[in-house]
Amino acid sequence: MADIDLYGVFVPALLVWAVAAFLVNLGLRRLIGALGLYRLVWHRALFDLCLYLVCLGGVVSLAGRLT
């Protein structure tokens, strides 16, 4: 599935997955911040980028299994 039809507008599937991964990442970042685990991280921005990439990989993998 290369494109997803949203009310007549075709958008790339990766864009939809990226938005879903961003929402998951946002929740995880808030949870990590609330638990105070960021004090264990050396470079917060790099950690957040890697966390997003892991979330994106998980969302894409999950979407591949569902289709």
Image (cartoon, grey):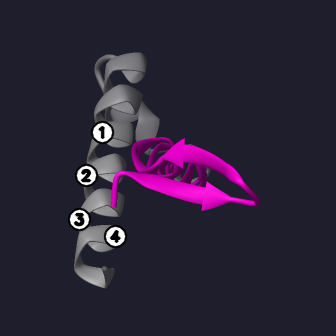
The CA span between labels 2 and 3 is: 6 Å
Q: Is residue 11 magenta?
A: yes
Residue under circle 4? 63
> Which residue of the protein is positioned furthest toward the right in this rendering?
7
Query: Which quadrant would the N terminus be assigned to in this image?
Result: bottom left
Which one is earlier in the sequence, the residue at label 1 or at label 3? Answer: 1
Which residue matches tag 3?
A: 61
**Numbered disc 1: secondary structure:** helix
User: Decide: marks 2, 3 in contact (CB < 8 A)?
Assistant: yes
Please tell me in which quadrant of the rendered image residue 14 appears.
Answer: top left
Q: What x and y, as percent, mark residue 17?
A: 45, 52
Disc 4 + disc 3, Cβ < 8 Å: yes
Task: Looking at the image, tell me whether mark 2 or mark 4 is earlier in sequence order.
Answer: 2
| Amino acid type assigned to the residue bearing label 2 in the image | Gly
Quadrant in which the C terminus is drawn: bottom left
Q: Which residue is mark 2?
A: 57
Viewer-side residue, 23 vs 63: 63
Q: Inspect the magenta stretch and tell me whether residue 28 lies in it.
A: yes
Q: CA distance from mark 1 to mark 2?
A: 6 Å
* Quarter location, residue 49: top left
CB-based contact (under 8 Å), mark 1 and mark 2? yes
Q: Are marks 1 and 3 in contact (CB under 8 Å)?
A: no
Q: Residues within 10 Å of mark 4 (few under 14, many from 20)?
A: few
